[in-house]
Image (cartoon, helix red, strand yellow):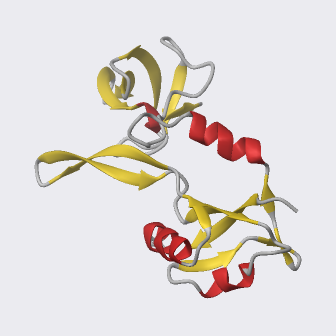
Amino acid sequence: MARQWYVVHTRPHKEAHADLHLRRQGFATYLPRYQRSRRHARRTETVARPLFPRYLFVALDVARDRWRSIHSTIGVSHLILAGEEPLSVPDRIVAEIRARETDDGYVALRLPAGIGPGSRVRLIDGIFADAKGVLERIADDRRVAILLELLGREVRVFVPAASVGTT
């Protein structure tokens, strides 16, 4: 049986630790990450974040590899199972995520399909989480301008494209 992708559930904020220790054991892993701007102490910095918090992918041949050792790896909570066997992920899922990576290895986050200027949207995180508005324009490759109804008037806010969802 050939290698397939499986999902590892990690301990909170330990994705990188789990990835490192699994690779040290000889497993092929994939931890998709994206870059996010974060404001802290009056400055903005760009930090790498896991695309799927608390999850990463591991390539296994379940008939040949000693996959049960994954459960006791530092940073790992458990391998996702279907009954007694690991639950595989279709190769196309990992391929699609990898196809969205930029030259620096981070996944490019874009607006959801079908959303453009004039679309009704909802913010999914940040200070305005769950606020609804209208997408005014795409500012650059990472930010969009949203018109929100706040305090009885429309206010333009710039947010990361990844923070925009459908209403």
Nearer to me, 159 or 96: 96
* Foreground of the two, 9 or 121: 9
Q: Is residue 132 left or right of residue 91?
A: left
> Does 20 sit left or right of 85 as displayed?
left
**Percent x, y for residue 71?**
65, 83
Residue 147, image x, y percentages:
37, 21
> x%, y% of residue 20?
47, 71
> Quadrant of residue 93 in the image?
top right
Query: Quick one: which residue is furthest to the left in this view?
Result: 42
* Figure quadrant of residue 105: top left
In the rendered view, would you say 70 is above or below 125?
below
Q: How many marks?
A: 0
Q: Nearer the viewer, residue 18 or 25?
A: 25
Residue at 40 percent across and 14 percent down: it is 136
The N terminus, quarter of image: bottom right
Would you place residue 156 above or below residue 69 in this image? above
Up-down relation of residue 146 to residue 38 (above or below): above
Q: Give the percent coordinates (x, y) of residue 152.
A: 33, 24
Q: Quadrant of the C terminus?
A: top right
Residue at image point 48% right, 35% down: 109
